[in-house]
Amino acid sequence: MRPTVPGRPGAARLFLGAALALGLSACQQPGAERADRAAPVNGTPAPTAAPTPAPPAPPGSGPAGTPLTRAALPEVRDPGGCLTGAPAVARAPAPPLALSGRLGLWVAEIDPKTLGVVRAVGTNPDSVFPLASTYKQAVLWALLREFDAGRVSPTERFDVTRGDQSLGIYPFDGMNVRDLSTRMIGYSDNTATDILHRRVGLGRVQAVADRLGLCRTRLILPTRDWWVAQSGLSATFSGTSRWAGATGAERLRLAGLIDADARRYPAGYVQRQLDLYFDHRWRPADDLRAHNLSTPYELGTLLAHEFLRPGLSPRALRWQREVMALGFGRRALRAEAAGNVAWFGGKGGNGWRLLTYSGYFQTKDGRQVVYAFMQHGADQTYTMPNTHRAFAWINAGIDAVIGVQTPRPPAPKPGKASGWNR
């Protein structure tokens, strides 16, 4: 069963994630238009500032002016086990193309042995942003841990019930776990995600962050729950002030109640209520209450562990690599156009005035790179057209960290046969 999508632009239909799986031809890097906008945590964009030219890197320095021979900066955690803020690194280059709203970026080369930061650049790396569909890679990681523990089989099959249906396209009845995971990442299928998220367990998906001490990262809610909460349909969410600051057992208890509220309504009704909310009552602060969240630095840390130290069996690792390679981003990287990407895994997300992209890649010479881009409160309600602008900035950050990635010239097309035979 598949929903119809409202014909008018705006509102809930913008959450459809399938476009993230397409090769967007707009991802090439245009000219030199730019905007550098600060992104405070409180959701109020700072005035646009004139760019400050970066000083040239001193001799013996890397692309961002950091010493080439310095030791990797380790992850640091406070006495409670929470990851502290991002290490002191150079500010990311200004966005080459204008981007509105609050912005965050973290690009880092990671030491594969220690997972410390070799070099990095960042803009607002410790500010909290909604994750949108970027969080779905955590569901996959949690699912694979359950597979390794013998609690989930890749051949287990599901029918799609009314309570499962989220916004967007639905998977077919009888689809198995392995195929649902492919739809979740390759097509950003919200219903496939919610089925797997609930099968794994809300707490086990949140544990992906908690085990790493990512105390500002929330991963616990399936997609339908965000929208039911945000549109005012969850009595639990609307009736408590404790949700935003809840952790541990209290967060799990409240999340279970919000999830139960969310499954009471048909998807079409949720979509109509969400349309009304976005058209008349939307506030940026509501996104930070309802959505799964992280910071660019914490998400970058999650990526480093997810791809370099996932703790998975060889079979689960092969599953992870095959599925995450389907995520959007590889063809948008200048490093790929330069022939310098040996392997890539990524995931993006979009929503009402928000856009996120994240990824990991290994270069041909063995360097490990992670990136996390976040935009919240954009001037555009539909943010997918901002993709080429987002990757212009991501690529500028990558150039600053590992050196300029110069696309190779296209291979010459074979000449046409004249049709004349001697």
Image (cartoon, rainbow, N blue to C red):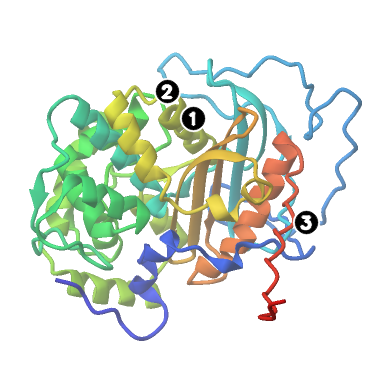
Residue 89: image quadrant is top right
Write down the quadrant of residue 379 in the picture: bottom right
Kind of residue sitting beneath label 2: Arg
Q: Residue at x 35, y 51 (%)?
A: 185
Q: Return the residue at label 2.
A: 309
- Whether residue 38 appears in this view of the structure is no
* Nearer to the camera, 282 or 210: 210
Crowd band around label 1 with a 10 angstrom C-alpha radius: few (<14), some (14–19), many (20+): many
**Which callout, 1 or 3, points at the residue further toward the start of the chain?**
3
Please name the residue that numbered disc 1 is placed on.
Answer: 304
Q: Secondary structure at mark 2?
A: loop
Q: Is residue 421 above or below residue 361?
A: below
Kind of residue sitting beneath label 1: Ala
Tag 3 secondary structure: loop
Q: Amino acid at mark 3?
A: Ala
Q: Which mark is residue 49?
A: 3
Mark 2 → mark 1, Cα distance in angstroms:
7 Å
Residues 344 and 249: in front is 344
74 is higher (above) or lower (below) than 200: above
- Indicate left or right for 70 with 116 as reference: right
> Which residue occupies the extreme front position in the image?
422
Residue 277 at x, y percent in the picture: 33, 72
Residue drawn at 62 percent across, 30 percent down: 109
User: Which residue is at 42% across, 59% downward?
Assistant: 21
Q: Quadrant of the C terminus?
A: bottom right
2 or 3: mark nearer the eye: 2
* Contact, mark 1 vs mark 3 (Cβ under 8 Å): no
Q: Residue furthest bottom?
A: 7
Instruction: Report if residue 276 is visible in the image.
Output: yes
Q: Is residue 336 above or below residue 350?
A: above
